[in-house]
Amino acid sequence: MRRLFWVTLGATAGVLVVRRITRTAESYTPQGLAGAVASVGDGIRVFADEVRAGMAERESELRGALGLDDGAGPDADAVGDLTGRPSQNRGGR
């Protein structure tokens, strides 16, 4: 009974080790490397999509805060203050 236990344990361990080695060896084949690169590319694509969505959301917040979406637009003094350029109607300074 003891020998049967140890033989079964050894066979199970051997199968697991062979499967792990085979999986590792397959990851270094051209197909395995292509799959790894593709998964990295997918991650970068998802990240870029999230960044674009955040940029669009922030732009809409800024446009709303500056009054650019309502059609009226900011007044000349506010634009001059934001851009650092003097406006035309500051009393001749």
Image: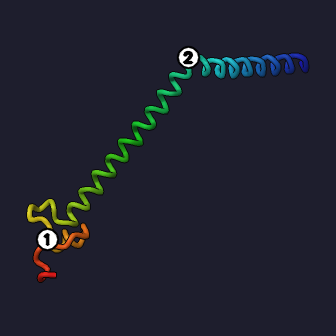
Lateral position of residue 55 relative to residue 32, left or right: left
Residue 87 is situated, as x and y percent measured from the top left of the image, at 15, 73
Please name the residue that numbered disc 2 is placed on: 30
Lateral position of residue 50 relative to residue 67, left or right: right
- Nearer to us: label 1 or label 2: 1
**What is the CA distance from the residue labelled 1 to the residue labelled 2?**
61 Å
The label on residue 76 is 1
In which quadrant of the rendered view does residue 32 lie?
A: top right
SS at circle 2: helix
Tally the numbered discs.
2
Residue 23 is situated, as x and y percent measured from the top left of the image, at 64, 20
Lateral position of residue 68 relative to residue 39, left or right: left
Vertical comparison of 7 with 66: above or below: above
Vertical comparison of 81 with 20: above or below: below
- Label 1 neighbour load within 10 Å: few <14, some 14-19, many 20+: some
Lateral position of residue 63 relative to residue 37, left or right: left
In the rendered structure, are the residues bearing label 1 and label 2 in contact, judged by CB atoms less than 8 Å apart?
A: no
Q: Quadrant of the C terminus?
A: bottom left
